[in-house]
Amino acid sequence: MLWNMFLTFFKIGAFTFGGGYAMIPIIQEEIVEKKKWIDDNEFMDAIALAQASPGPVAVNTSVYCGYKLKGFKGAIACTMGTVLPSFITILIIAIFFFQFRANAIIDQIFMGIRPAVVALIASAVYKMWKKAQYGYDKFAIALGTLLIIVFMDISPIWLVIAGGLGSVIINKLRVKK
């Protein structure tokens, strides 16, 4: 199982361009839909926890999933699977990049990858939103948060903290009633 977990996350890490958020739909497809290691609700919790924790969201998600499945050894296996492809790729690029940094073809390749990365991130947002089944109140909060981040230049960290505290307060008030 540990080897299977490592290979699954290695494949995810090796074939996803655009960083952690672009990996989310691929992680979801592999571990929720195909392998059924965790369910949709657990995946949503993993993403929420990964975003609220320091570090890359894909690595944090892999730690969560690995730990949930096989404890500490599972967390190590999934994390190594996620990190190694990027590490190897960056190492190779660092070794050879200076030879190709002014190459027009390489520049065009990266220009072509950028829209695909935006589409992967948008896809992840859409799939998560659809599965979360939020109402208009949560949509208004999400939209308001987006507008604050974009137009008021407030760090998302403060908004995550405010959202967490707000949720605790609202839930405590509900319990009292």
Image (tube, grey):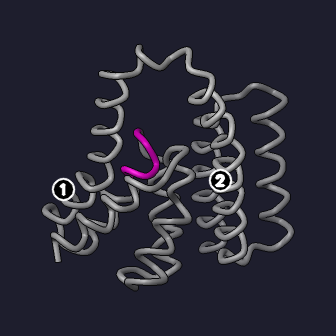
Label 2 or label 1, whichever comes before in sequence order: 1
Residue 65 in the magenta stretch? The answer is: no
> Which residue occupies 49% across, 67% down?
45
**Crowd class of label 2 (few under 14; some 14 to 19; many from 20; radius 10 Å):** some
Q: Nearer the viewer, residue 117 or 72?
A: 117
Q: Is residue 41 left or right of residue 120?
A: left
Q: Which of the 4 image quadrants contains residue 32?
A: bottom left
Residue 58 in the magenta stretch? The answer is: yes
Residue receiving disc 1: 76
Cα distance in 3D space between marks 2 and 1: 26 Å
Q: Is residue 165 above or below residue 175?
A: above
The secondary structure that most of the magenta stretch takes on is helix
Q: Which of the 4 image quadrants contains residue 119?
A: bottom right
Determine whether the residue tagged by mark 2 lies in a helix, strand or loop.
Answer: helix
Residue receiving disc 2: 121
Q: Which residues are magenta?
A: 55-60
Q: Is residue 125 left or right of residue 138?
A: left
